[in-house]
Structure formats: structure tokens, C-alpha cells
Amino acid sequence: MCPDTQRAATTQCQYPSCTKAVWKDPDGSYSSFCGNTHRLAMANNPKYTQSRTCKNCNSKPVYIENGRAHDFCGRRCAEEFNNNGRRPSRSRSSPPPRENICTIPGCPNRAFVDADGKATKYCSHRHRLAAVQRGLADVCLFCREMPTVEVGGKKSDFCSKHCSTAALSRVPTILDVPSGNEIYTDVVNQFTQKWEHPTQTPTVVKLWRIYGDRSVLDQFSRYQLEVERRTSLPGGNTRRRFHGTIRACTLGDTAADGNLCAQTTCNMCRIIESSFQRARAGERTNFGRFGEGIYTSATSSKANDYYFGSASPNRAMLLNDVVMGKAIKLTTTNQSLTQPPSGHDSVIGEPGGDLNYDECIVYKNEAIRASFLIVFR
């Protein structure tokens, strides 16, 4: 991509009242905004989107749904646009394509088509509810009633823009993941399968999804993109890794324990609140085999070794997204490291030398974000 000649490093973010400079991508091009927060906020701002007209008729304003501006004024224009300008057929002689049928078993009805002309999975509100009640779909983590949807080809944690906005307006926060949801099974399987110590594998009591401050997500996403472009590794070689630390409260023990505590000694709540801080590395152990970095492990039982908490009979750990990029494998201790060896983005401590179980170390705060809180016994 050629650098954008209309914007420069001194160009101001287009978000109203923001005075920050626009974000520069690693390829040299400049965004219209300072980051994802303002880009998404502007895209979903009704005052900004109300002036847009339908892509098909070019006369009527686009349809606004829960603050989100669609591309078309209504279903008919969406269908006509997707049909190369031809009016959608209203013939009843041929049945709709199979993919446009409600996914509830036995239901022959057409699936609802939204204002963008995209067919949903269900024919009605009643069948959306039925999908969750019958265990055919994951339930929204916020309203805990409707099935989740896909956004940009990826499964969302929420059923709608309304629930997503409501949940994310409370960050930093955690939301209880029901045992029937696919991600619950996925995380619990990773936890149990990677318990490699010769002790009995614990039982997961609760799983919580972590939603950190928006600025933390922005920094993580930027770093992830930069590493991906530099290394050509998909997603910057992002992996899920476990981290054990101090929990001075009962966060996550029950459905009623969903609020972060204010204790400065509660590392778990502070990480969820403001993410990982390399400056605090080694505070508890006073030892870092590979220097001053942020330590995680693919082995859940290894992370458990670093847990401390006396306020609850349960134990807990964090499962995190870690941008590992180009990793170097080391087997012997090197406490002098303050960054990965040249040409690398992270260090993997390999078992077999000075270690019995693996370690993953990153040296930048933006290379890691907490994703799940696992409570177990």
C-alpha cells in the first residue's frame, strides 16, 4: 500500500474535540483517527451516520438500528443491490435457498433478513429464544437470553449492538460464561489438558470473560498488527497462555463475586483493571529466570504454582492472549535480559535444561492482555 499523501503525522484525528495526531500504520499510511476507539465511535455515531444515503437508491437515508448505520434504507433496496440492480423476485413457485431457512430443526420458514440484506439464522424472535433454550446456540453474555451473533465473520460474545455497547460501557469488567457456551468448553479443555504436574487435575468452578479498558485493547491490537506485518505471522503469532498471581479477594468465586476489589495487593484485580505492568515483574518471586519480563506458561499447573490467595478456598488464574511474534527458545537461565535477543519478540523457556515446565516471556506491556479468569478447586 502506498502511503496516504492527504494525511501526515501532524494531521489531527477527525473525532470531534480530539486533538491527537492520527495513527500511522507500519506500511506508512495514515488513518483518519488516532486509534480504534475513535474510529469505531465515529462509525457508530448516529449524528455522523444520519447524513449517509442508501447505497442502492442514493436518495433515502440509511437505516439506523441500535445506533448502527446500515448500508441501505431498507430490506428491498438491500436485496435489489445484492441482485445486481434487479428487483427481488416475489415468485412463490420456488422455495428459498436452504441457507435462508430458519435453523431451528423442523422449521420451514424463511430466516429474517436484516436491513443490509443479510439473512440471519432464525425466522422470529421466538425461535431466537428457542435456539438458546434448546442448547443450539451460545447465549449472549450480557442479556443471557438471546443467541450470540457473528460480527465481521467472527463470533461475538453478544446478541446485538445494544448488548455489546451496554457491556463495554462498564469496562474494566468481567462477565460470567455459562457452561453451555462453546468458549467455556474450549477454555476448560485447555486448562485440564495442560495440567501436567503429577497432582489431581482440579475442577473448574467458574469461568469469566475479561473486558479491559479500551485503551489497553487499542495498544494490544496495534502491537499485534505491527508484529503480524513485520513477521508475516498470522495474528502476530498470538497464543493463549496461563498466568498465576496474588488474589487477595474472592473475585469470581460465585455469580455475586463479579466486582473488582480495591486492594492494592490484589494483583489479579489490578491486572484486570489496568493490564500487565512489566515494572512490577518479579515483585512476588524476586526472581525472573529470563530477566525482567512478563511471564506466562502453556502449562496451567505451572501457573498454579505462582498463585497465592487466602480469602477463598478456591484458586484462580488468568488465561491471556500473548503476542509471541518470532520467539526464541532458551534452555538455560539468563537473568540479565531486559528484552528478547535481537531479531525476536519473545522468549520461550524450554523444559529440559534449567526448567521442568515451559515459560513464555514478553517484555512489552502491549504484548499481552488478560482474556479469561478461571476459578477452580
Image (cartoon, rainbow, N blue to C red):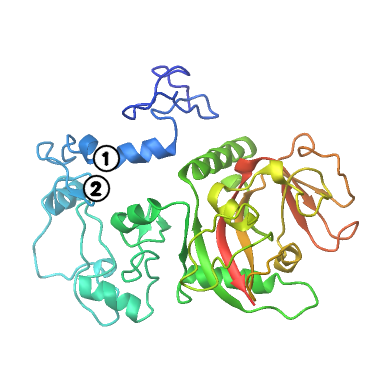
Q: Is residue 176 left or right of residue 64?
A: right
Q: Residues within 10 Å of mark 1 (few under 14, many from 20)?
A: few
- Disc on the earlier residue, 2 or 1: 1
Q: Which residue is mark 1?
A: 45
Q: Which one is in front, 329 or 56?
A: 329
| Drawn side of residue 276 relative to residue 62, left or right | right
Place residue 326 in its image quadrant: top right
Where is mark 2, residue-wise? 67
Q: Where is residue 72 drawn, in percent x and y? A: 18, 45
Q: Amino acid at mark 2?
A: Gly
Where does residue 300 sit, x and y in percent of width and height?
Answer: 70, 66
> Tag 2, which secondary structure?
loop
Q: Nearer the viewer, residue 130 or 202?
A: 202
Above or below 279: residue 136: below
> Which x, y percent locates residue 189?
61, 73
The total of numbered circles placed on residues is: 2
Residue 49, position as x, y percentages in the image: 22, 38
Looking at the rendered structure, the kind of residue marked 1 is Asn
